[in-house]
Image (cartoon, rainbow, N blue to C red):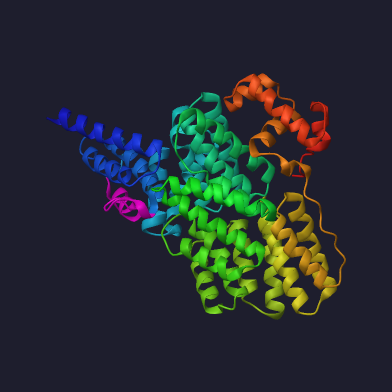
């Protein structure tokens, strides 16, 4: 009988895994949660693995999860499940991630920190890396540990590529693109989006491109904005059970609207994310603070700051930097100035260039309104140069307008010629510029050598060059 029960539970687990792997959906979290509960008395380790799979299915399904399969319910059930005598890294990840949702960030830190450290030290097997690597990167994000998040995300993608695990690669590229965009390397983020599109086409895996929407939001290119957003929104709608994708879309709208100075729109978009349980509310809260302050909703801004303080983690320059910026936006006089300086000092120690540039921007805006034009020009000039170097055009234009208001003469920068390329053309051109052969490019992007040649001919025509040698001048690497 026990063998039959285990077999039935395994079938239920595999069904849920298949549903979750092909596309986020309503039923996968419930199936996996039911399987995990059945497995508790049969195989504790397998039960905990299944709980972690159910946690991910619930996270991605979001608001579309069927009754009984929402993220809070899955997290609560996971914390009540039996624990093995010798916990594995994935057990620590399950405990930590579930605690973030069901108990709070502070209670989750010890388990998450230990799990992240084990992955950083390579104290896990190759199979565990492939299966649970994205959970480790998510744990680093929950700890506001940008360096560990970046390192683990890079390793996860490299391992997925090397192993040929295409399903894992699609998911790894998706979350990796989010991290890279948040660090301001928009050229690399565009390449990752193109690579993910290529792998999705080969595998038929249906998952919305999270990084693509955040990339477009950070780029903020007025000429390209409407068609790009429309195309991405169409994809998100087609993945109608992907609640995480809809939250990413709202978060991207908040970032974009803040960059364009449309603060009422940014406030509404950020609130859609901040008001629901997910791992995106931390980002949404600091978008919400800026939008609320700029639109005169100071009570809402203060509420968002208090909620942000509840999820920050001690010792993180990232969380300290955005916390200080939030405090500065809600303060006045010398107190505000000290908080702006603290934010800049903290964020300068991280690779989060967009966040650092945004603090320079809001600090410069504040200084101009205080009548300190010379000081404002220094901060706004730094922001403008940083945003321009990244290719964050809407934020750069916001900084340029503020500089003009101080009396500074600033010429609008021309859009780089690479912007005429499609994302796939830009990715192929970038790989060719970096010395990859046509065969190597084709193998990486799962296309034929002839297709690579065809794309490169189009690239050469658009960039008005005749060979690969011209790519170095036509597509210069952005300063890191």
**Left or right position of 167 against 198:** left
- Which quadrant would residue 386 be assigned to in this image? bottom right
Q: Is residue 369 above or below residue 213?
A: below
Query: Residue 414: x percent and y percent?
Result: 81, 51
Is residue 36 highlighted in magenta?
no
**Residue at x 49%, y 38% (from the top left corner):** 171
Specify the farthest residue to the left.
1
Q: Is residue 202 above or below residue 329?
A: above
**Residue at x 34%, y 37% (from the top left corner):** 19
Query: Residue 297: x percent and y percent?
Result: 55, 77
Q: Is residue 301 above or below residue 435?
A: below
**Left or right position of 421 against 300:** right
Quarter holding the C terminus is top right
Query: Residue 422: x percent and y percent?
Result: 66, 39
**Residue at x 77%, y 59% (from the top left corner):** 384
Of 57 and 89, which appears nearest the observer? 57
Quarter holding the N terminus is top left
Query: Residue 228: x percent and y percent?
Result: 60, 49
Work out whether residue 455 can be spotted. Answer: yes
Q: Which residues are magenta?
A: 63-81
Work out whether residue 123 can be spotted. Answer: no
Of 191 and 201, which appears nearest the observer? 201
Is residue 69 highlighted in magenta?
yes
How many marks can you see? 0
**Left or right position of 241 against 352:** left
Q: Main secondary structure of the magenta part?
A: helix
**Residue at x 75%, y 78% (from the top left corner):** 369
């Amino acid at each position: 009988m026990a063998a039959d029960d285990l077999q039935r539970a395994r079938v239920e687990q595999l069904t849920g895994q298949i549903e979750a792997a092909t596309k986020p959906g309503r039923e996968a979290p419930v199936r996996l949660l039911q399987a995990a509960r059945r497995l508790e008395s049969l195989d504790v380790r397998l039960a905990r693995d299944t709980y972690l799979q159910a946690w991910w299915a619930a996270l991605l399904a979001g608001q579309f999860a069927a009754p009984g399969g929402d993220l809070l319910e899955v997290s609560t059930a996971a914390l009540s499940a039996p624990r093995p005598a010798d916990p594995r890294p994935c057990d620590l990840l399950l405990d930590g991630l579930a605690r973030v949702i069901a108990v709070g960030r502070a209670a989750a830190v010890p388990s998450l920190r230990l799990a992240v450290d084990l992955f950083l030290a390579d104290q896990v097997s190759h199979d565990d890396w492939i299966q649970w690597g994205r959970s480790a990167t998510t744990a680093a994000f929950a700890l506001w540990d940008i360096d560990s998040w970046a390192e683990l995300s890079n390793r996860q993608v490299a391992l997925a590529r090397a192993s040929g695990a295409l399903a894992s690669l699609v998911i790894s590229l998706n979350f990796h693109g989010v991290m890279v965009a948040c660090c301001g390397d928009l050229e690399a983020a565009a390449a990752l989006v193109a690579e993910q599109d290529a792998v999705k086409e080969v595998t038929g895996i249906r998952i919305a491109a999270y990084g693509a929407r955040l990339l477009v939001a950070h780029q903020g290119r007025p000429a390209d904005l409407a068609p790009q957003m429309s195309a991405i929104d169409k994809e998100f709608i087609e993945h109608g059970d992907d609640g995480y994708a809809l939250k990413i879309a709202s978060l991207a709208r908040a970032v974009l609207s803040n960059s364009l100075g449309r603060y009422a729109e940014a406030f509404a978009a950020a609130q859609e994310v901040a008001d629901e349980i997910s791992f995106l509310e931390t980002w949404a809260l600091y978008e919400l603070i800026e939008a609320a302050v700029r639109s005169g909703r100071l009570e809402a801004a203060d509420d968002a700051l208090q909620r942000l303080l509840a999820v920050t983690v001690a010792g993180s320059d990232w969380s300290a930097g955005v916390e200080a910026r939030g405090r500065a936006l809600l303060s006045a006089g010398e107190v505000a100035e000290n908080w702006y300086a603290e934010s800049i000092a903290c964020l300068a120690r991280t690779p989060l260039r967009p966040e650092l540039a945004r603090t320079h921007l809001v600090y410069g805006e504040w200084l101009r309104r205080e009548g300190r034009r010379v000081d404002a020009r220094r901060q706004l000039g730094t922001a403008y140069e940083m945003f321009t170097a990244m290719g964050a055009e809407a934020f750069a234009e916001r900084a340029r307008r503020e500089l003009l208001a101080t009396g500074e003469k600033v010429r609008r920068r021309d859009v780089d010629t690479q912007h005429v390329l499609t994302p796939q053309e830009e990715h192929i051109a970038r790989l060719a510029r970096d010395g990859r052969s046509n065969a190597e490019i084709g193998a990486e992007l799962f296309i034929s050598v002839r297709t690579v040649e065809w794309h490169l001919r189009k690239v050469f025509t658009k960039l008005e060059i005749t060979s690969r040698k011209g790519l170095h001048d036509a597509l210069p690497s952005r300063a890191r």
